[in-house]
Amino acid sequence: MASPKTLFAKLWDRHVVAETPGHPAVLYVDLHLVHEVTSPQAFAGLAARQLKVRRPDLTVATADHSTPTHDRSLPIADELAAAQIRKLEKNCAEHGIPLHGLGSPHQGIVHVIGPELGLTQPGMTIVCGDSHTATHGALGALAFGIGTSEVEHVLATQTLLQRRPRTYEVRVEGRLAPGVAAKDVILALLAKIGVGGGAGHVFEYTGPGIRALSMEQRMTICNMSIEGGARAGMVAPDDTTFEYVAGRAYAPEGAAWDGAVADWRTLPTDEGAAYDRSVTIDASQLAPMITYGTNPGMGLPVTARVPDPDHAADPARRQALRKALAYMDLHPGEPLLGHPVDVVFIGSCTNSRISDLRQAAAVLGGAKVDPRVRVLVVPGSQDVKRQAEAEGLAEVFRAAGAEWREAGCSMCIAMNGDQLAPGQYAVSTSNRNFEGRQGAGGRTFLASPLTAAASALAGAIADPRRLGERVTAGGAGSGEGV
Amino acid sequence: MTVAAFRAFASAVVPLLADDVDTDQIIPARFLKTTGKAGLGDSLFADWRYDAGGAPKPGFVLNQPGMAGRRILLAGANFGSGSSREHAPWALTAFGFRAVLARSFADIFRSNALKNGLLPVELGPAAHARAAALVEAEPDAEVAVDLAAGTVTLPDGSQARFEIDPFSRAMLLEGTDELGYLLARADEVAAYEAAHPARVDTTAPVVG
């Protein structure tokens, strides 16, 4: 019998086209996702060499990053963004690449539309010029972000040169308590291992705590693998996965479906397979998390106080904490709960799916957001938007005083006009709290949709567990749709 | 495109000794609306380098006298973390950098740097500390980088070896790129495709 293999090793080995000793492997790409920001220079590179896109039928594009989320009937005010989106349209038309662009009923954040259209399937290799491509690993795919040179390589050859990464098991025991979300699992992992802890590795999230999660919750966790330095994060496919994929637009049907599922059942890591590293997290012990600093590893339970840099043993860590607290204008020992916020952003490829919006709506339903706070709710895709409107969630958000916007990356990356003013504080369901990430001088607290919505009501950082039954036991929006 | 072959060189150093310098600092996202690669050097480290009115902040290292023209950046650990934007090495090379010396690099940044003639040099703790101390003591002293030999020569004459995988090393020294290598394997790709049917057809209309 062959030696036991990890999920990662099985996918890797299946996709090696060629391997020369001393060289990186030539890895085949099953699905290439393209967006407006990291592709124009790659298409220009093709043109310079007079190359065609090898497999437009394995490529799909959307406009999300620099795309406005205001009324789509209005023109794009930013001429650079407009030109970038036009360039994507032109490149896709020229090369026969399907584009779910502005005006398409399926436009949305690239990592939201892939799974929801059924393009993302277990066992695939998936790449995109975007570091949050790891999201797709939630379905048992090997998915990772690439640079623009590599986008060009994949467009031209459908392959990439890759060195085999090592494996890192992130085992999650226990079940989440009420008011605690998948976002809190990943923020707790990042606080534990740091933003470089997974460098050179692929995470595989395992254990009963992961098995108990919905597909959308798993996506939230895999999404932020890169925040721990790992290019990819994966979850072995199971019945939850198959139920999610079944019936989606591009999912196999009939006998092809049965064959696919039979194959997907062979993918999980074999008993006895070894990981290069491992870490364990007990989900049952987690509280809602929030970041206080300027990288996603600087996170704490929402009830904690701002740490004192002087207590850090490592001088580099001390320096980083001092710099972060100065940027955030936070002070050692200060409680995070009750810290005033100016903006709440609910959206991004981390937390803009229907179950995220249901959770936020459960908190905001029948209440009003604090009048001092601007609240933006940005659905991850037009499909999510339609479903949220059909379920009455959009009306809940509007009635609470929040803005209900069109689909896109929006204030996660602040390229489209949705941004913080200098000095403003935001509680954000996005994935990065780097300096200026949500607008030059803006200050970000990363948190779950539950914590974000609770903070919107309070006008300050709030603990969603204090809202009682609104957030019980995943009841708010544990199901998934679209 | 081919890039210029990487030659040994010596340069004074720009010290930026922080850990976890992310790509949003190297090149903030608002500069990613360009559809080209040119001109990004002016936006390198924009939010650390300029105030809200666009005036240089005198405290930031790149604005200090004598920094223009230096080709080596000395950083801390996990340099280039965060996004996959290749605009980060484009901005660094447009400014004039040819090598970044650091304790470690984020994976995607390292990969992007190698494709743009920007050498990521990972130094061990002792060599890194020595480099930082020497540059602090003698800010204008030169460091020599020799990719062929795999060495960095510090201002005191001491040498530190660095590892780089032989494939990337050869590509840099020859000034060739990976696309040519991949294109030359078209037959193997075709054979793979013949044996592995496509998983999806994205060109089919969305139904359901």
Image: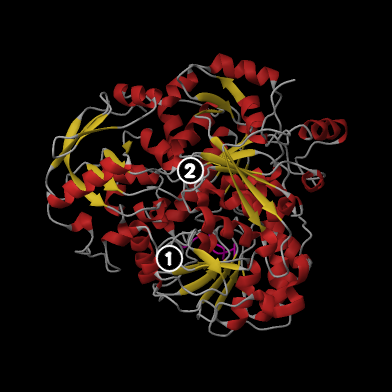
Q: Quadrant of residue A15?
A: top right
Is A236 on the left-hand or right-hand side of A90? right
Residue A361's place in the image compared with A129, above or below, is below
| Secondary structure under the numbered disc 2 in the rendered image | loop
Name the residue rendered at 45%, 30% in the picture.
A46
Residue B172 visible in the displayed image: yes
Is B153 on the left-hand or right-hand side of A49? left
Q: Quadrant of the N terminus of chain A?
A: top right
What predominant SS class does the magenta segment belong to?
Answer: loop
**What kind of residue is marked 2?**
Ala
* Whole-percent x, y for residue A197 in the image: 49, 48
Name the residue rendered at 40%, 29% in the picture.
A48
Residue A439: assigned label: 1
* Whole-percent x, y for residue B142 in the image: 14, 40
Residue A199: assigned label: 2
**What kind of residue is marked 1?**
Gly
User: What's drawn in magenta, residue-wise?
Assistant: A68-77
Local packing at callout 1 (Cα closer than 10 Å; few below 14, some 14-19, many 20+) is many
Of labels 2 and 1, earlier in sequence is 2
